[in-house]
Amino acid sequence: MARRIVEIVLIVCLVLVSGCSTMVDPIVQAQTRSDSLEPEAGEWQTWVLDSVDSVRPAAPPDAAATHTEIEEVKALAAGRSAEDEARIAYWNAGAPNYRWAEIAIAAHAQAKIGATPRLARGMALLNVAIYDATVAAWAAKYTYNRPHPSEVDSSLTPLIEAPNSPSYPSEHAVAAGAAATVLSYLFPDHAADFAAKAKEAARSRLLAGVSYPSDVEAGLALGQAVAEQVIARAMADGSDAVWDGAMPSGAGYWTGKNPVQPNSGGWQTWVLASGDQLRPPPPPAYDSEQMQIELTALKGFTPTLQTTMTAYFWQSPRGLFAFTYTTIGRLLFEYGLDANPPQAARIYAATSVAHYDAFVGCYDAKYAYWSMRPFQIDPTFKPLFPTPNFPSYPSAHSCQSSATATMLAEFFPAERDALFATVEETGNSRLWAGIHFQSDIDAGKTLGEAVGQLVIAHEKPMTARGR
């Protein structure tokens, strides 16, 4: 008789459940998950963190608290406005790095920091912080294996697709916490704005129905904790050193005043042993036959509309520096890696490290040789636009474009020809503008490629597991 009663109760329960949403135990659900998005990324080596365990968040809330959080997420979803949906779409576009790279470039532009080692430093700090925080987040995700809200309660329909990885902590919140903290260090006057953007990015995941409140809270805290360690490194990298004003005198040396960032060749690098590790040989002497040949070639060049437009493009803020990061975003989208936060963070970080180290190596050589610009050797020669205020050799445009092309070609080998065609165009644009010699460009390309190869050799073992 008792057995018959149990059977009847079970049948009634099944009938009731069949017409309702299904709520499962999140702990049981987690044990049966089969997520496959980079499950071993939590074991990748990091750039700054000694151990991901040092920043691992505590375990997510228990089943009862999880169900309470789901009700909060449902309430937020029910009250979504058109503006909320626009914010969700904005922050969900691309990998978590994508919007923060845009924000960082805009912040540097607003601060009138041109394509110099200081800008490259800021972007490397940003992307290294996001990468290290993402690796730490993935270690936590696959430790706790928390399912997303819609996997626990089938009545909750997310506005966007839930990522194919555990929910806790939120990777978008992790990136937001890391990025906003680094940017606040770089631009303290705008810290409140960066913090507000981080909160908005994190909240967008709640409004979209793909994360719990505790996911975003843990993510923001994790990102901030990692960024603080990156900032500690930055504060000791030598970038605040004051230049002593010493310049070489005599014939054949650069003759400007207040040169841009003359100490930057001594800043701490990420992969190079030091800024002078790959220093190129000296440039041709200002009064040598080789230099006269190169100067004659510059003076004999006949500009066209296309060469002039190209030269101005690569001189503009939207040219060389922003181009690197818009290219990364485009390639991630085209190759389907924008939905893979660990791989995207890896590519952003490695490329910006190569970018920065190439800049440091380039400026080491510039201020080791203090070579003259074309208009200084021949005052009658007029460049297309004002020449940048630092020595000529090697070309910084060629150094950094070659380094980033080398790095990106490693990740996207089918793009190698297009990437290096851009390196050629970038270098030629400096000739067309009349602000560099061919020897400057050749040395820059060689140095940049060598930096890129060193970064590749360093980075490959960092992420070898799981590939």
Image (cartoon, helix red, strand yellow):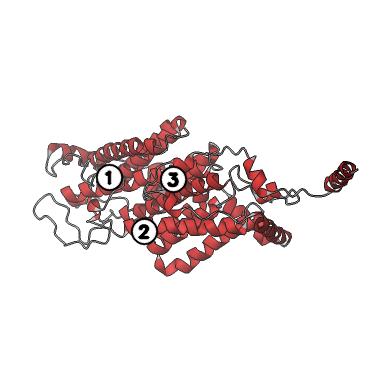
**Contact? badges 1 and 2 (CB < 8 Å):** no
* 391 or 293, nearer to the observer: 391
**Sequence-wise first label, 3 or 2:** 2
Residue 318 shows in the view: no
**Quadrant housing residue 87:** bottom right
Q: Give the alpha-carbon distance from disc 1 to disc 3, as whole Å.
A: 23 Å
* Frontmost residue, 18 versus 162: 18
Report the disc number at residue 365. Answer: none
Q: Position of residue 422 (x, y in %)?
A: 40, 38
Q: Is residue 292 left or right of residue 80?
A: left
Residue 170 in the image: state x and y as whole percent.
56, 52
Q: Residue at x 43, y 41 (%)?
A: 44
Q: How far across and down, in percent of the image, does residue 114 sit?
A: 35, 56
Q: Amino acid at mark 1?
A: Ser
Residues at marks 3 and 2, CA–CA distance in whole angstroms: 18 Å
Q: Which mark is residue 395?
A: 1
Is 168 situated left or right of 444 in this image? Answer: right
Q: Which residue is mark 2?
A: 231
Q: Secondary structure at mark 2?
A: helix
Residue pictured at 59% horizontal, 49% vertical: 167
Q: Is residue 193 visible?
A: yes
- Precedes in sequence: disc 1 or disc 3: 3
- Badge 3 local density, few (<14 within 10 Å), some, or many (20+)? many
Q: Identify the element where label 3 is drawn.
A: helix
- Helix, strand or loop at label 1? It is loop
- 462 or 273, nearer to the observer: 462
Label 3, on which residue? Answer: 348
> In the image, what residue occupies the spot 44% across and 50% down?
53
